[in-house]
Image (cartoon, rainbow, N blue to C red):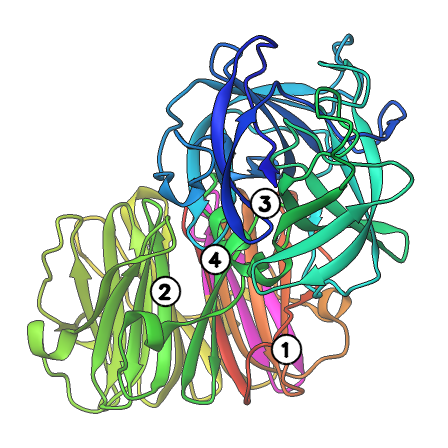
């Protein structure tokens, strides 16, 4: 069984070591080819990519799975196509151009982009290839999450050789029956004369479910029976394909590296903490167990997060009563695992609440400990200032039950705090001076007793939203210091009972996350023009337990 990538030059040749009938056999690798099957109608399988590798060195097929990523076979880029596991991550060795959405190669339809980065999968013949220029206007193919089953009919579109064309100018596709399923791949057999030929390495193996196409696997190697240039004695049309359904989470994590994801959600469930990133198209990466990845802190009693220069800073109140600081990087890793702030900065006593906010490159931390409000700052160079008592300069505020901090224009830090069911506001200017507490109810209008508050910047304004005993409310503080009258969010969120709220600024939107008493988390955006989006309910099926709150962060 031969791998299907090969030189596009019709007179070039290469050797590939392949698995055949249980033994390693060396076969001459003929020119690039395509699926033996029918020519695809114009505009169909638009997510299929033709990959031109090197100066006509090789040609492969791939699948657009994100505006910035093509999923294909690692063997397309390996020095030895028979050893895809040897492919290193990083820029491709040879200049590679992806042509996407061009069913007929004689036309100018679709888009072209160079491949700038490769992220290979170690356990199978797969690689995610980043596009240097994102492709818009072509719908990516959804990656399947349900396992394939023997007997299913699949479709494979490809750009290479057919039974009578060395280098066809049109995309072809063929039907295949699914024969076998293993942990990393599936075996298929062409039907109606279909076969996977040389050059189809990386082609999408597509399943249709309820009228919608999804990517099940990626073509890797085949017998090529019926392909032009293959001896007529070879009649086998079987192929081996690398599964993607059981690594859909990995695909999502790689997608999250692309510029375009900006929002992260930290969800508390009982004493556990989970993190997911929202992609440009609104989908979310799988939830990651934060303590498993960043260090066990004995459970999480409270948490806050802030985005600075692509990093997400997380400060959590652990089961030990201490504050712990970790940094989640843009590439999905943890650049810093949890570090105990109590031992490195100060031991504040009985901490009950924490909120953090970015102001420029500085991270501001506000906590309530022994009923007292403290403030500290981690500068952009990583140096911490000592915690200072805020109420010594703002005036006293007793019985604080909820706090939220947000950065604002001019290097200001704003803090909202709930005391006695009412919301109070103070701000710290760039010079470090604090204003006295001001009553939000007196400035913007009273609500029923408040249990939770969230603030976030939007342009020069400060959004403030609350959970009250009779619903959710919102107001704005303008840069001039005036307040907009408080408004109910009932028309936005519907008839829900909120138990917690958080907010973040993403681009020009203010994003709010509301935890409800029926174990749901609702997201809604306030646009710069004042209009709100319909609430989106986060999919929390993968998170066990009681969802006790969430924190939204903008990381870019």
Q: Is residue 361 visible?
A: yes
Q: Which residue is mark 1?
A: 541
Q: Which residue is mark 4?
A: 504
Image position of 308 (left or right of 393):
right
- Please state which of the two labelled residues, at mark 2 or mark 3, is closer to the viewer: 3
- Relative to 373, residue 465 above or below: above
Q: Are marks 1 and 4 in contact (CB under 8 Å)?
A: no
Crowd rating for badge 3 (residues with CA inside 10 Å; few <14, some 14–19, many 20+): some
Residue 41 painted magenta:
no
Whichever of labels 1 and 2 marks the residue nearer the N terminus, that label is: 2
Per the model, the C-alpha gap separating discs 1 and 4 is 24 Å
Whichever of labels 4 and 2 marks the residue nearer the N terminus, that label is: 2
Q: Which residue is mark 3?
A: 280
Residue numbers of the magenta segment: 455-484
Q: Are marks 1 and 3 in contact (CB under 8 Å)?
A: no
Please provide percent x and percent y for residue 339: 17, 71
């Amino acid at each position: 069984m031969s791998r299907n990538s090969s030189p596009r030059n019709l007179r070039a040749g290469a050797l590939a070591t392949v698995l055949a009938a249980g033994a390693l056999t060396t076969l001459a690798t003929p020119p690039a080819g395509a699926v033996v099957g029918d020519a695809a109608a114009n505009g169909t399988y638009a997510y299929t990519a033709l990959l031109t590798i090197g100066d006509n060195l090789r040609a492969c097929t791939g699948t657009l799975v994100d505006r910035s990523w093509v999923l294909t076979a690692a063997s397309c880029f390996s020095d030895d196509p028979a050893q895809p596991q040897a492919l290193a991550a990083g820029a491709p060795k040879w200049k590679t151009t992806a042509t996407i959405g061009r069913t007929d190669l004689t036309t100018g339809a679709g888009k072209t982009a160079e491949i700038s980065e490769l992220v290979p999968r170690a356990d199978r013949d797969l690689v995610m290839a980043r596009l240097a220029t994102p492709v818009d206007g072509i719908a990516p193919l959804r990656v399947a999450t349900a396992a394939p089953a023997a007997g299913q009919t699949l479709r494979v579109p490809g750009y290479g050789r057919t039974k009578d064309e060395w280098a066809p100018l049109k995309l072809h596709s063929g039907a295949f029956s699914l024969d076998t399923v293993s942990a990393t791949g599936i075996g298929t057999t062409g039907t109606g004369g279909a076969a996977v030929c040389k050059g189809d390495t990386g082609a999408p193996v597509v399943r249709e479910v309820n009228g919608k196409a999804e990517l099940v696997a990626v073509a890797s190697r085949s017998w090529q029976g019926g392909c032009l240039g293959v001896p007529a004695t070879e009649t086998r049309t079987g192929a081996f394909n690398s599964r993607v359904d059981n690594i859909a989470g990995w695909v999502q994590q790689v997608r999250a590296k692309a510029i375009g994801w900006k929002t992260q959600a930290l969800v508390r469930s009982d004493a556990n903490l989970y993190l997911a990133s929202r992609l440009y198209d609104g989908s979310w990466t799988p939830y990651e167990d934060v303590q498993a990845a960043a260090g066990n802190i004995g459970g999480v009693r409270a948490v806050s997060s802030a985005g600075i220069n692509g990093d997400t800073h997380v400060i959590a109140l652990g089961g030990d009563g201490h504050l712990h600081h970790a940094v989640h990087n843009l590439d999905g890793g943890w650049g810093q695992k949890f570090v105990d702030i109590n031992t490195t900065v100060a031991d504040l006593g009985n901490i009950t609440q924490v909120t953090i906010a970015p102001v420029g490159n500085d991270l501001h931390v506000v906590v309530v400990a022994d009923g007292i409000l403290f403030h500290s700052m981690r500068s952009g160079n990583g140096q911490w200032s000592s915690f200072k008592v805020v109420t010594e300069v703002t005036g006293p505020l007793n019985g604080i039950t909820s706090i939220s901090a947000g950065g604002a224009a001019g290097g200001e830090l704003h803090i909202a705090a709930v005391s006695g069911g009412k919301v109070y506001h103070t701000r710290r200017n760039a010079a470090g001076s604090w204003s006295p507490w001001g009553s939000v109810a007196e400035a913007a209008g009273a609500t029923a007793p408040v249990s939770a508050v969230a603030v976030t910047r939007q342009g020069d304004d400060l959004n403030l939203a609350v959970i009250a005993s009779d619903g959710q409310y919102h107001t704005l503080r303008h840069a001039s210091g005036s307040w907009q009258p408080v408004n109910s969010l009932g028309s936005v969120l519907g008839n829900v009972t909120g138990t917690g709220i958080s907010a973040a600024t993403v681009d020009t939107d203010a994003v709010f996350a509301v935890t409800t008493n029926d174990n749901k988390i609702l997201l809604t955006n306030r646009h710069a023009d004042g209009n709100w989006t319909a609430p989106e309910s986060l999919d929390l099926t993968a998170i066990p337990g009681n969802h006790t709150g969430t924190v939204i962060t903008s990381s870019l």
